[in-house]
Image (tube, rainbow, N blue to C red):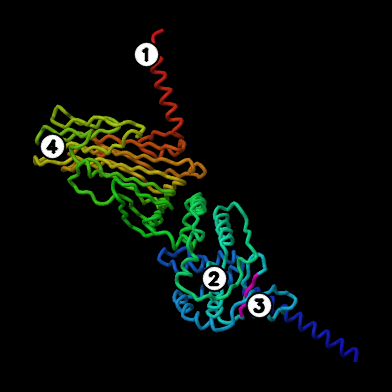
Amino acid sequence: MQSKKQENEIKNLKNESFAKNQSIKELTKEKQDLTQVGAQLRNQLKQMTASKVSFLVLFVCLQKLLQRNYFLLIVELLANCSNALSYRLWKNLKAVKKKKKYQKKKKINKNTVTNMQMSTLCVFKQNDNKHRLLVQKCNGFQVWFCFVLFLMAYLITAKRKRSEKIRLETEVKQSNAISNTNEQKNSEDSMQLMDFGEPTYDAWDETLITDPTNNPQVNKNWMESILQKNCLDMMNDIFYSPGLILSLKNNVDFLLVNENNKIVKLKNKKWNTFKFGVYLIGERITLTLDHLSTNKNENELGQFKMNTSHLWIKDYRSVIDCSGLGYPSGMGDGKGGECTSKYNSFGGGAGHARKGGQDDIANGDGVGGTAYGEETLLTQLHCGSGGGTGHKHDGSSGKGGEGGGIIHLKIGQQLINQGTIKCNGLHGERGLSTYVGGGGSGGSILIEFQPASNSFRQTIGIIICKGGNEAWNHKGADGRIAIYGIKLTKEEMEKIDPKPFNMHCYFSFFFELNLQAFLRLIRTIKF
């Protein structure tokens, strides 16, 4: 009898060990499958556009709420969901309300749950392992439906049931998580399942606003912590943060262009302010000013003024372009002279940073325009002037090229210029083999970095402000470039044409001016 009992015990142990091995193999295989699904979804998320916001909101809610625990399982559920699921969920909330109300789940003892039970359950838990939700494993759609129901029960009732103190603590945790200065400090009831109230659209909408406390000081600190990031982190926040997705508007709070071959026009002579940055992510994007008439006067000259926290020009073929938006032919402080001969004569090049080019004045070609303005660009920003009019071989006139416009940028945090920033003067009108009109002169580019931008690495990139007809004698003069707030390296200087006026900070600039004035005063004093 004892031998039979021993044999039965041995068989039972073997069966249990075999079952454990099988469950381990199944879990390992499931983990591998989930890893593949996660990789596929991550690739899909990278290719998503801003129009697919409804899918991303749910994704970020899950990721933030669960704090990246069981992330692959969430990915599997997301792969089986659809955008119409939220509507079906709201439709079924009243039916769910008739059932038993949710209660806080007790802490589960792992010893009381067999391996077979664990293999048939999907576990959703918080980081502290104190709050869990067990859902019986079935097809992916049903699991997803149950879990989103659990999620929405938490979100809807959190705003209504929690006290002001708890909500303030939640806001502080969000700020700490965003600024990466503190670890998670969740309260014991941060994932508490609360009783259903009557669900309304307003209740759901209020749970995802950026400032649930409505406290101006907290909101200000939160906004400052959001902006203290580089361009890539800001892009991730705009795409994947539920609060930002719902509260910010493209082309108002930020400017995001991820389409190719796109021309975006901003307001002329007005500050275009984008507090959360400008991101030109697509290929061959042109950022310029709204339409100006061909018969420009001084009131219609192009002045591109932008104040932003971040500026990222990603593609090398993308540009911020104000070329030809300055004075038209024969106008401006440094306008090129008109030719005096009626046939085959060139107009004079426009001046700006220096005198404009000229050809053979004795044969009737136009005189080059005079220089104007000052190199610091602090007193006034000038547009480029128009080139002088020339005459073609048949006696018809050829207009000079338009001057470059003005670009004034204020960068609060980071500039990544992998494209080009330019405001060149244009070529004059062409005759048979060359340009008969004088070249327009380059405009002005002023870039100011705020003190906070010193904590980030800046990519200055290509900045040009050249005159038209560059290869000819009657070429337009170059414009002016000034950059404040950072110190340019030799390599950065090589990509900027003409060479810019550069000061690391305003204090050193004014100190240098005062020193020069003092030295001039000393020279005038006779001892």
Is residue 134 inside the magenta stretch?
A: yes
Visible residue check, residue 519 = yes
Residue drawn at (52%, 53%) of the image: 218
Classify mark 1: residues with Cα within 10 Å, few (<14), some (14-19) or many (20+).
few
Q: Amino acid at mark 3?
A: Glu
Question: Does residue 249 sit above or below 526 in this rendering?
Answer: below
> Tag 4's secondary structure?
loop
* Position in image of residue 432 (x %, y %): 16, 43
Residue 23 placement: quadrant: bottom right
Dot 3 falls on a residue whose secondary structure is helix
The Cα atoms of the two marked residues, 1 and 3, are separated by: 92 Å
Q: Name the kind of residue labelled 2 in the image.
A: Thr
Predominant secondary structure in magenta?
strand
Give the spatial CA distance, label 1 vs label 4: 52 Å
Q: Can residue 506 be found in the magenta stretch?
A: no
Amino acid carrying label 1: it is: Thr
Residue range in magenta is 131-135
Q: CA distance from mark 1 to mark 2?
A: 79 Å
Q: Counting other residues with Cα less than 10 Å from the Cα at mark 4, is it few (<14), some (14-19), or many (20 or more)?
A: many
Q: What is the three-letter code of the residue carrying label 4?
A: Asn
The label nearer to you, 4 versus 3, is 3
Name the residue carrying label 3: 26
Residue 448 placed where, x, y %? 41, 40
The residue labelled by disc 1 is: 524
Give residue 344's mark.
Answer: 4
Badge 3: few (under 14), some or many (20 or more) residues near its Cα, within 10 Å? few
The reply to whether residue 229 is in sight is no
> Can you identify the residue that label 2 sits on?
157
Horizontal and vertical percent position of residue 39:
54, 67
Q: Nearer the viewer, residue 40 or 309?
A: 309
